[in-house]
């Protein structure tokens, strides 16, 4: 439900947030919509489209530059920290796991460093030769993250 509400708010803000260039108006400093520690999803980043769809944790909001400092969790950009605009973040439908709960393991233990090879799918071929770390075993899809 939060995801839908967030999307509606963003669409309404985008329509209402149009300011005339050169009007002399200064945009008021915004307050943080997302709280420190929350998991959110990256959307609509044009300069780095491969960020889109990834889950990040909000570290802090920088009101002076109107950006959130976030850290990627899992996947290709695991532990990478970047600053993103609010419109490039939305609440994620991913439920947060408790810190004590262990991630499911497959035959390869979590945390194992691996090198990818043998990927034949056209969209995934670029990853052949890339190095990564096993985050967890996704039982439903029978794949590693």
Image (spheres, rainbow, N blue to C red):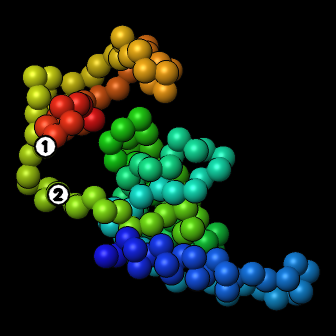
Q: Tell me the residue at 39%/55% (across/down).
A: 56
Q: Quadrant of the C terminus?
A: top left
Q: Position of residue 79 (x, y in %)?
A: 38, 43
Left or right of 26? Residue 90 is left
What residue would you read off at disc 1? 103
What residue would you read off at disc 2? 97
CB-based contact (under 8 Å), mark 2 and mark 1: yes
Q: Measure the C-alpha gap from mark 2 to mark 1.
A: 9 Å
Q: Tell me the residue at 45%/66% (across/down).
A: 90
- Secondary structure beneath dot 2 equals loop
* Image quarter of residue 12: bottom right
Position above or below: 105 against 128: below
Left or right of 35? Residue 30 is right
Give whichever of 69, 134 is nearer the camera: 134
Question: Going from the N terminus, do you reach mark 2 or mark 1 first?
Answer: 2
Q: Position of residue 103 (x, y in %)?
A: 13, 43
Q: Label 1: how many residues lie within 10 Å, few (<14), some (14-19) or many (20+)?
A: few
Position above or below: 79 against 24: above
Q: Residue furthest right?
A: 22
Q: Which mark is residue 1?
A: none
Left or right of 90? Residue 104 is left
Can you see residue 144? yes
* Image quarter of residue 26: bottom right
Position above or below: 132 against 32: above
Q: Position of residue 100 (x, y in %)?
A: 8, 54
Q: Position of residue 48 (x, y in %)?
A: 60, 44
Q: Label 2: how many residues lie within 10 Å, few (<14), some (14-19) or many (20+)?
A: few
Q: Quadrant of the N terminus?
A: bottom left
Give whichever of 138, 64 is nearer the camera: 138
Can you see residue 127? no
């Amino acid at each position: 439900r939060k995801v839908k509400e967030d999307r509606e708010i963003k669409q309404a803000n985008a329509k209402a947030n149009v300011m005339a260039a050169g009007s002399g108006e200064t945009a008021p400093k915004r307050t943080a919509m997302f709280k420190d520690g929350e998991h959110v999803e990256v959307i609509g980043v044009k300069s780095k489209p491969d960020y889109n769809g990834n889950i990040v944790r909000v570290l802090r909001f920088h009101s002076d530059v109107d950006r959130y400092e976030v850290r990627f969790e899992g996947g290709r950009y695991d532990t990478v920290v970047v600053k993103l605009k609010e419109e490039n973040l939305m609440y994620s439908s991913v439920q947060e796991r408790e810190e004590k709960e262990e991630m499911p393991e497959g035959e390869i233990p979590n945390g194992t460093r691996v090198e990818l090879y043998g990927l034949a799918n056209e969209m995934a071929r670029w990853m052949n030769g890339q190095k990564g770390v096993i985050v967890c075993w996704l039982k439903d899809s029978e794949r590693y993250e």
